[in-house]
Image (spheres, rainbow, N blue to C red):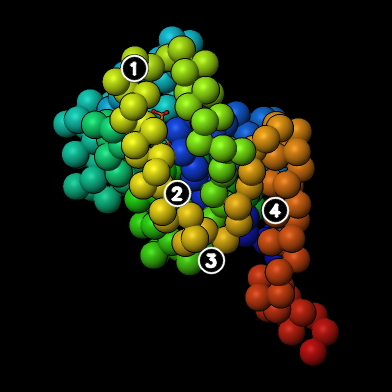
């Protein structure tokens, strides 16, 4: 029997580098895939529909909620974001680990209907470093950066609801830590007990 994949939820303040960690991780681990969210935010330069996000209108987003198409959804700095449910469940069923790179409100919704998920919170080495990274991205206005930093403080307040903290001080180390978390979770007793009882008891 094929094992179902595990659901990993990765959150952390804007600018912490969680997007890069998740994208790099799936490039080198073909047992894991990154879920593509829907958003009402406008694409940033270089972003592509169906690759970074599905860029949809507010009306399309509302219709998706009404039809129960999202596993979770949230508003972040004035834009809406949601995880398409069907694609995630199909990928888990096919045995892939699925990574959701989402903010905290959505993560808490996932935790309430999918408690067997693994919740990872990415932190920067310091708040100052986070601000430098957000400014260095050059993709947001000053006003948006301020909003995102304010929001970051609210997000830190929820980090103890997560199972793991992953400090992103260096991409290579962050990737090794994520790989270690994934391996450990596969070996976690409750995920294996059914197999052990069937095979050995
Ligand atoms: P950005 O606009 O920088 O791409 O994303 C803003 C925030 O929205 C990030 O914290 C990102 O993790 C989060 N986000 C992206 N997709 C989703 C989603 O499907 N659901 C939720 N709740 N948050 C998301």
Image quadrant of ligand 1 equals: top left
How much space separates mark 1 and mark 2, taking CA atoms?
A: 21 Å
Q: Are marks 4 and 2 in contact (CB under 8 Å)?
A: no
- Read off the residue under disc 4: 182
Circle nearer the N terminus (4, 2): 2
- Read off the residue under disc 2: 156
Name the residue at the right extreme.
200
Q: Position of residue 103 (x, y in %)?
A: 41, 43
Q: Secondary structure at mark 2?
A: helix
Circle nearer the N terminus (3, 4): 3
Numbered circle sitting on residue 142: 1
How much space separates mark 3 and mark 4, taking CA atoms?
A: 13 Å
Circle nearer the N terminus (2, 3): 3
Q: Secondary structure at mark 3?
A: loop
Question: In what quadrant of the picture does the C terminus appear?
Answer: bottom right
- Read off the residue under disc 3: 116
- Between 15 and 65, the one lying in front of the other is 15
Circle nearer the N terminus (1, 2): 1
């Amino acid at each position: 029997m094929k094992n179902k994949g595990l659901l990993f939820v990765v959150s952390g303040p804007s600018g912490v580098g969680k997007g890069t960690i998740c994208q790099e991780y799936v490039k080198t681990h073909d047992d894991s895939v990154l879920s593509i969210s829907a958003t009402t935010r406008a694409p940033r330069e270089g972003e592509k529909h169906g690759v970074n996000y599905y860029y949809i209108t507010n009306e399309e987003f509302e219709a998706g909620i009404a039809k129960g198409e999202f596993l979770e959804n949230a508003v972040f700095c004035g834009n809406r974001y949601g995880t398409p449910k069907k694609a995630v469940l199909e990928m888990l069923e096919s045995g892939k680990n699925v990574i959701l790179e989402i903010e905290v409100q959505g993560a808490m919704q996932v935790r309430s209907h999918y408690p067997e998920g693994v919740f990872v919170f990415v932190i920067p080495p310091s708040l100052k470093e986070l601000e430098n990274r957000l400014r260095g991205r050059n993709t947001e206005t000053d006003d948006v950066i301020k909003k995102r930093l304010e929001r970051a403080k609210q997000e830190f307040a929820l980090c103890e609801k997560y199972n793991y903290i992953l400090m992103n001080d260096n991409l290579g180390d962050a990737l090794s830590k994520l790989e270690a978390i994934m391996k450990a979770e596969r070996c976690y007793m409750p995920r294996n007990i059914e197999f052990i009882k069937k095979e050995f008891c």
